[in-house]
Amino acid sequence: METWSEMMRGRDHRISAETIVVGSGPGGALTACLLAEAGRDVLVIEEGPRSGLSETEPFSRDEMRRKYRNGGISVALGNPSVAFAEGRCVGGGSEVNSGLYHRTPPEILEQWRRTHGLRDATEADLVPHFEACERDLSVSRLPGTAPAASLRLHDGATALGWRSMEVPRWHRYDAQGPGCRQSMTETYVPRVERAGGRIVSGTRARLLRREAGRFTVRCAQDDPDGGRREVDFTASEVIVACGAIQTPTLLRRSGLAPGGGTALHFHPTVKVVARFPEPVNQAGMGVPVHQVKEFSPRIGLGCSISQPPHLALAMVDHPDALSEVMSDWSRYAVYYAMTTGGAGRIWTLPGISDPLVQFSLSKADLADLADGLRRLCECLFAGGADRLYPSVRGLGPFSSAADLARIPSGLPRAATSLMTIHAFSSCAMGSDPRRSATDSYGRLHRAPEVRIADASLLCSPPGVNPQGSVMAFARRNALAALESAS
């Protein structure tokens, strides 16, 4: 990786490349890798620092401070508001998430074809791209027994006759130990550099400008002395892969996608802390891998990272019980119910670098969340839990299935704490410029030399962890671009 001093030594402040990729998360890193390996002169610009998996403890405060935007706590304003998290480092969200992997459900792809005129994106079209990504990332299931907290959810679903599954992860296991999560810094980022691509971190893209048939990416870059300075990068094409919040922000400020960010979607998520009679949690427990898909895509149930800091955060609506939970935390775990409802908008404000994000939920959306909470609690009791704390102030704790009658038909706006780690659809792809920011291959309708390669492209909430979808479309679109240029 070139440092600031190496980039600037003996050079002016306009650095050129054939292709610039803004963002190094799953979509950006994969796209940069394919282009560099095809012989393109590729420069990747990343706002955050470079910090490998081994440099921070997974799911720790240090990791949140170093690898997340705003320390992992950003908020979409609304009633209720939704807390969300964005990775901000080389490798993006792949460096901080659980690595759970899904292909896009076929019914969702068909829905996107009908609603957005999405072309060449049937299950059959995408299978080669899913398979290639799965090979590159060693997508596989656990070689041994799943964590106890994960199994409790699966046991409850099985007892109720609900469909539950172990979700594979992009993780390389080995006989000597737990192996290694196959994030971008373990996979595509090294391939970019081996193929001659350059990756510049600590550099925030602020504006894109078209000048004399080329694009200039105007950036603010970290200075070795602790300051910030302006630097311009130029290229004949630009791929924007900053994520569903930052991509439309950059494009709107650049006048390239005026409608970008007007159709933001999340997977709104309500959480429950469950207590069991016996220990289900331990230090380094690992990633829970079971999800309940009986009610997909409307509702999905799963188990979260449940180390003590995460338990404490999940108990914010039940402060009187916090000391009890923390003193006996091995008997507790965090679970979630996520839905596909709600819609948001991203606003750019003059003089402020970060956008304003708004998100709203209808009465029907709150009813879906209440239904998800009820079913999650039912599943946990069937799995052996003896006390449940939902993330709704004044509701609970629940000690038996009979208590679930207290859950209202719709979650109360003022008392419900919602979060998400999945954002998408803010620059959807499709054939109709009135409904989509890009064509079916991620090219901006207003500026085809600019392409998007991240979760912004997904036309609606997929109802599953979106990274598999992001990478399959990024691969499909990059290969199509290379073929059309040959």
Image (cartoon, rainbow, N blue to C red):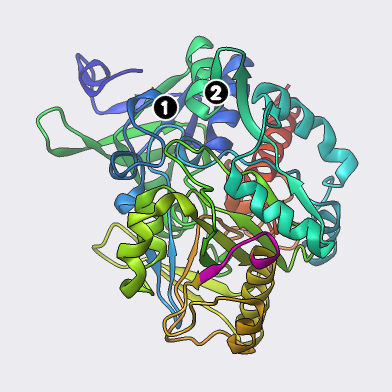
Q: Amino acid at mark 2?
A: Pro
Q: Is residue 37 visible?
A: yes
Q: Is residue 466 visible?
A: no
Residue 357: x and y in percent read: 42, 68
| Amino acid tagged 1 | Leu
Quadrant (top left, top right, bottom left, bottom right) of the N terminus: top left
- Name the residue carrying label 1: 53
- The residue sitting at 47% across, 34% down in the picture is 24
| Residue lying at 52% horizontally and 37% vertically, measured from the top left | 286
Q: Nearer the viewer, residue 264 or 339?
A: 339
> 99 or 161: which is nearer to us?
161
Residue at disc 1, secondary structure: helix
Q: Is residue 382 magenta?
A: yes
Q: Which range is magenta?
A: 381-388
Pointer 2 or 1: first along the chain = 1
Q: Secondary structure at mark 2?
A: strand
Give x and y (percent) for residue 76.
42, 69
Q: Which residue is mark 2?
A: 178
